[in-house]
Image: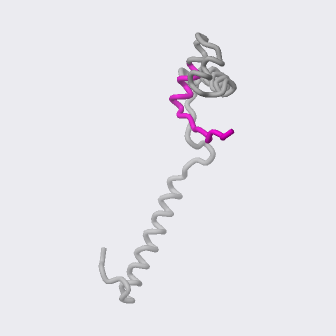
């Protein structure tokens, strides 16, 4: 017996299968045959859809990263430091003859 390679299903496919399971027009076994997916997987997708459906129409939006706030002043200071270093190195390399073309 050969093993089937692991498949990665797209979110569109998962939602299509989960919605079919929520409708209840077919049993999980019938859906499993139709979509070639294990019935337990269909149940997991259906349960996840039902659990997270409320977030779609009124839940709070999740921010990308709430761990650390971005400090703009620190970033500007770092940009200034790097600019000074680049200017210094450009001048030193030009004087040493290692940098002949000015940008």
Q: Residue placed at 36% from the left, 84% from the top?
A: 94
Indicate the position of residue 23 as horizontal and vertical percent values. 58, 12
Camera-nearest residue between 47 and 43: 43
Q: Quadrant of residue 18?
A: top right
Figure coloring: one colour
Residue, far bottom:
96
Residue extending furthest front?
Answer: 1
Rendered-image quadrant of the C terminus = bottom left
Q: Is residue 57 left or right of residue 94?
A: right
Q: What residue is shown at x 55% (from left), y 41% (from top)?
A: 64
Confirm whether the magenta stretch covers residue 9: yes
Q: How many marks?
A: 0
The quadrant in which residue 48 appears is: top right
Name the spot of residue 1 as percent of width and height, x first.
69, 39
- Chain part drawn in magenta: 1-19
Q: Is residue 71 above or below residue 29?
A: below
Near-viewer residue (86 or 38): 38
Give whichever of 61, 11 is nearer the camera.
11
The x, y position of residue 73, in whole percent, is 51, 56
Residue in view at x 65 percent, y 18 percent: 28
- Left or right, 44 with respect to 57, comes to right
- Residue furthest to the top: 25
């Amino acid at each position: 017996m050969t093993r089937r390679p692991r498949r990665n299903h797209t979110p569109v496919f998962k939602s299509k299968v989960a919605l079919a399971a929520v409708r209840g027009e077919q049993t999980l076994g019938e859906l499993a045959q139709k979509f070639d997916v294990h019935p337990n997987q269909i149940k997991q997708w259906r349960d996840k859809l039902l659990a997270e459906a409320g977030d779609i129409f009124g839940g709070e939006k999740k921010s990308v990263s709430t761990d650390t706030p971005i400090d703009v002043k620190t970033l500007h200071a770092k940009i200034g430091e790097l600019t000074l270093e680049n200017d210094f190195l450009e001048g030193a390399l030009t004087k040493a003859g290692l940098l002949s073309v000015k940008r």
